[in-house]
Image (spheres, rainbow, N blue to C red):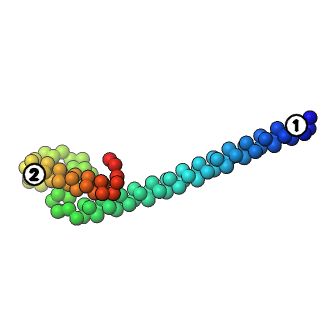
Amino acid sequence: MLTVAKSVLSDHWRVEKKHQVDQELNESQAHHTDIEFEYLNSEKVRIIAQLLEGMPPLRRKVFEMRRIEGKSREEIAQELDLSVEAVKKHINRAMVEVTLCAEKHGWEF
């Protein structure tokens, strides 16, 4: 009876240890994934910042006002003394550049 109890207890601890090791491995992988995710995001931010710096100043300004500040096309047109159509063209051209950059780096939106 004592041998059976030891065997059952030994089996229990072996299974428990395996679960603990699996959990630690999963946590380690999750931590690694978090670090990788943070690195990739910081890399994306760096690349997008370079892309924005390379845009003509007016296109960059229009894009930032629309995408970052959340202003309407009409607000942007009024503030920058442009037509709404000109604002649309700047936004579209900026988005083409961003999309091409994303495709080049294999990113998905």
N-terminal of the pair, mark 2 or mark 1, is: 1
Q: Is residue 49 left or right of residue 35?
A: left
Q: Residue at x 28, y 64 (%)?
A: 50
The amino acid beneath tag 1 is Val
The residue that disc 1 covers is 4
Q: Is residue 82 left or right of residue 95?
A: left
Q: Residue at x 20, y 58 (%)?
A: 60
Q: Residues within 10 Å of mark 1 (few under 14, many from 20)?
A: few
The residue that disc 2 covers is 86
- Disc 2 to disc 1, how far (Cα)? 83 Å
Please indicate, yes or no, whether residue 79 appears anywhere in the rendered image.
no
Q: Position of residue 72 (x, y in %)?
A: 18, 45
Specify the farthest residue to the right: 1
Q: Residue at x 81, y 43 (%)?
A: 10
Along the line of sight, the residue nearer the viewer: 90 or 77: 90
Looking at the rendered structure, the secondary structure element under dot 2 is: helix
The amino acid beneath tag 2 is Ala
Q: Is residue 53 left or right of residue 12?
A: left
